[in-house]
Structures are given as C-alpha cells and as structure tokens.
Amino acid sequence: MIIDEKGRLFGKLNILDILFVLILIILIAGAYMLFSTNSKTDTVVPVTYTLEIKNCDAAYFANVHIGEQVTDGVTKAVMGRIVDFKQAPAEVLTEANNKIVMSYPKDRFDGYVTIEAQASVVYPDLILDGEPIKIGQLVAYRSESLAMRGYIIDIQYDIEQLRGMK
C-alpha cells in the first residue's frame, strides 16, 4: 500500500507534513518574486509635473520665478526646478440661493507651476529625493522666493523608458 493506516506515505512520511512543506516552498517562492520585482530603483527618468495653486492674488504669483529650485517644505527634499508658470482667473465654488455655483472672485487667480526633476522609479511609484509624487497629492513646497501649497494635477514622463525597466 502507498498510504498506511496511520496516514504515512510508504510507511515513512506523513501526508500533512508533505503538504506543509509544499505550501511553505510556494510561499517562499511567491515572496521572493513579489519583493524582487518591486525593488528596482536603478531607473531614473526625467519627469515634468504641474502644481495647481488656488485662489491667490497677483502679488503672490509675482514671486514665481522660472529656474528656481523647489524643495519640500517639511523634509527639505529637492523636488526639482520651476520651468513654466501660468495663471488664470480663480474659480471658486460658492453657495447662492441653495445652489452651488462657480464664481470668479475679482483680483484672485489660480496658478499652475510646472516643475522638472529626475525621478527614481520604484515601480509603480516615482520618487524625488526620497519623496513620492502622485497626481492629486497635496504638497507644500518652497522655492527661493515663494512658499507654495497646492495639488499635483499632472505628471509627464517617458513611458517607453519605464517599460524597458520591467
């Protein structure tokens, strides 16, 4: 008989012991595959991302200077350099007659600061000087002449370069 009355295979190995060892081998192999594919940090890609700053006056935006270095306001990590800036009339949601309406406050603007940097790739994240960047992320940055608080609304990078790293 292959399995005896005590559940041993060929009278020597217990079936439960064999199943335990097989499951353990599968878990170890799975963990190795999971952690070995997520630890690629050698790839560095150029990224351009846009920070939206809402509802400020013109004097505030007069302090945005192209070429200035941008750092994280808390960690002091280097987040790139300002390469472009645009402003538009501020759009603010307000309540009027029990309805939510878009208003355009006088002498208020929304600013769009474009920042260029080199990002490390820890798939699927982009990391700038140890700080991840993601669309929709609220950030507090500083340049030499301005403190900025806003949301990242766009990130551009070379997708072909990322595909080559997988």
Image (tube, rainbow, N blue to C red):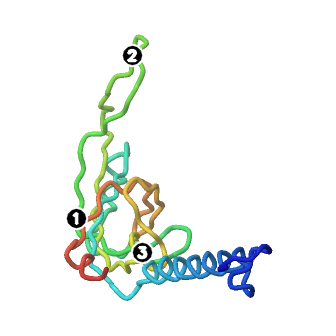
Name which residue type carries label 1: Asp
* Residue 116 position by quadrant: bottom left
Pinpoint residue 28: horizontal percent, then vertical percent. Answer: 58, 81
Front disc: 1 or 3: 3
Q: Is residue 157 left or right of residue 129?
A: left
Residue wearing tag 3: 127
Residue wearing tag 1: 84
Mark 1: secondary structure: strand
Pinpoint residue 94: horizontal percent, then vertical percent. Answer: 40, 25
Q: Residue furthest front?
A: 1
* Residue 145 position by quadrant: bottom left
For the residues labelled 1 and 2, the Cα–Cα distance comes to: 36 Å
Name which residue type carries label 3: Ile
Q: Residue at x 30, y 33 (%)?
A: 106
The C terminus lies in quadrant: bottom left
Within 10 Å of the Cα at label 1, are there few (<14), some (14-19), or many (20+) other Cα atoms? some
The earlier-in-sequence mark between 2 and 3 is 2
